[in-house]
Amino acid sequence: MTIMSAAGGGFSRRTFLEQLSMVGGTALVMAGMEALGFGIGSAGAEPPKLTGGAKGKKVIVLGTGVAGLSAAYELSSAGYDVTVLEGRDRVGGRSYTARKGTQLTEFGGEPQTCTFDEGLYINPGPWRIPYMHQGYLHYARKFRVPVELFNNDNDHSFINFDKGKGPLAARPVRKQEVAADMRGYASEMLAKCVRQGALDQQFGPGDKELFLDYLRSEGYLTPDDMKYVGTEGRGFDVNPGAGVDPGPGKPSTPHKLGDILQSQTWRVLKSVSAFDQQRTMFEPVGGMDQLPAGFVRNLKLQIRLNHVVEKIAQDANSVTVSYKTPDGQQGSVTADYCVCTIPLSVLKSIDVQCAPAFKEAMSEVAYALVCKIGLQMKTRFWEEKYNIYGGHIYVDDPEVQSISFPSTGWLGEKGVLLGYYPHGAPAAKVSALSLEGRRKFALAAGKKTFPEYADACDSAFSIAWHRVPFNLGGWAQWTDEGRAKYYPTLCQPDGRLYLAGEHLSYITGWQEGGIESAWQQIDRLHRRVHA
């Protein structure tokens, strides 16, 4: 979907929402999302009330990502006889943490065992939680899964753009320097226009001086002549300290405006964060697999692991799921209803008895190609030498996308960095490398910013979600045409089969999408039972 501007040009929904946020803050953004059909206004902060009992009904839940676990927990708590089948030897789906002993073999790949030190880990799938994801936080609170802050941005970190030009290209530049200088120069130029009367018609009585006061503050301008000459917030060449040396320190010198523009480093700046990418977010203490573990502790039923679904059949009165176990044993389970949270990338290859339109819809959703790698470092050099605590290194290489620092273990001896996070075609290219090739690629990318990067690494664990069994992709990628033509079909049950997961939400790629989708579907199922 593209929104048309008043001048007739097109701009994206994300751009539109960012502009709304600048004008009216979160309230206007939420209203805009509702108007665009994002359904954010109906997002629940808690699960539906499944009152009235289960009337002796049986339900099969397929998959143990957060969508399947949410459905299983709420249905079983309401009295339904629930059977949960999971193809893997673990629960959690993409809500996954790699730590010492974690094993993974991708399709066509080499066996891999994580050798991180005890207590260190990487979240190869979801790794951060926005504050508005109340479904996730509901269960974290309910199951007493502690969360901590995730530093999603850091002005003291680096921008390192290879594709830019000029003296700031292909070298690390502190983000705070670029942010201060660009705001300073922009404010200075705008202040000149205001003082010359070029914008007088835009102001009401008294507004002009108030706006100039804002520009002085926003751009760190000198009080009288409205010039940008730098600010201590961009950092010092020599920090202030004791005595006369260093004493007051040595202030840093602003970069030239043209150098910043030519370097392209300004592209990472946002005066207002994206709605789902706030500067401060959450993560569960100890790894993303802690919430699935919380579900398991509170489920009053046993999950059947290593049960690979081969067929879903149904008639007017029941649904039967056939499965196979690793030892080759085949079996089946029959119930009144089935809630299936298997990703569509996998489900479309399973023998599912459903309407032709339903089957067609399952096949019309692409899934993201996406890779991650965790790099265990022998020292936390980014903290000790560069004073960087959390956040990301911004690069313009799509095969790297970003390098990210942990928001845990401050001042510790070791730590695990996210070495790359490419999407789409670049992810396909990186995923084709051997495990050692991926490690070397990630280390070469990081060494462009940190000379000690490669020597400091003593272990790596990588994943390409489009090559992982039972996933075959990172998240659903709906087109506008698919949303209009196929999405509504899959949101409704086909006979006794209900689908749920992040792919049946407008919050694709987030755990919240899976949780809220499951809530919506079990509410439908329960209302049907009591109709």
Image (spheres, rainbow, N blue to C red):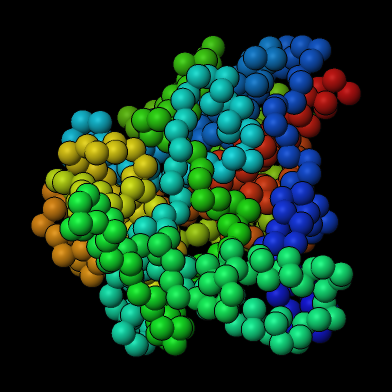
Viewer-closest of 473 and 147: 147
Quarter where residue 499 is shown: top right
Seen in the image, is 531 located left or right of residue 104? right
- From the viewer's side, name the closer residue of 135 and 69: 135
Rendered position, 68 above or below 479:
above
Q: Is residue 365 above or below residue 224?
A: above
Q: Quadrant of the N terminus?
A: bottom right
Instruction: Please identify the quadrant where the C terminus is shown.
Output: top right
Q: Is residue 166 left or right of residue 9?
A: left
- Residue 469 x/y as whole percent: 40, 47
Q: Residue at x 59, y 51 (%)?
A: 276
Q: Position of residue 23 (x, y in %)?
A: 75, 62
Residue 87 horizontal/vertical position (percent): 44, 35
Residue at x 19% of width, y 41% of height: 414
Q: Can residue 421 be seen from the camera position used here?
A: no
Q: Is residue 28 visible?
A: yes
Q: Quarter-wise, where is residue 81 in the image?
A: top right
Left or right of residue 289, residue 480 in this image: right
Residue at the (50%, 76%) spot, across then down: 228
- Residue 133 % position (x, y): 62, 39
Q: How many marks?
A: 0
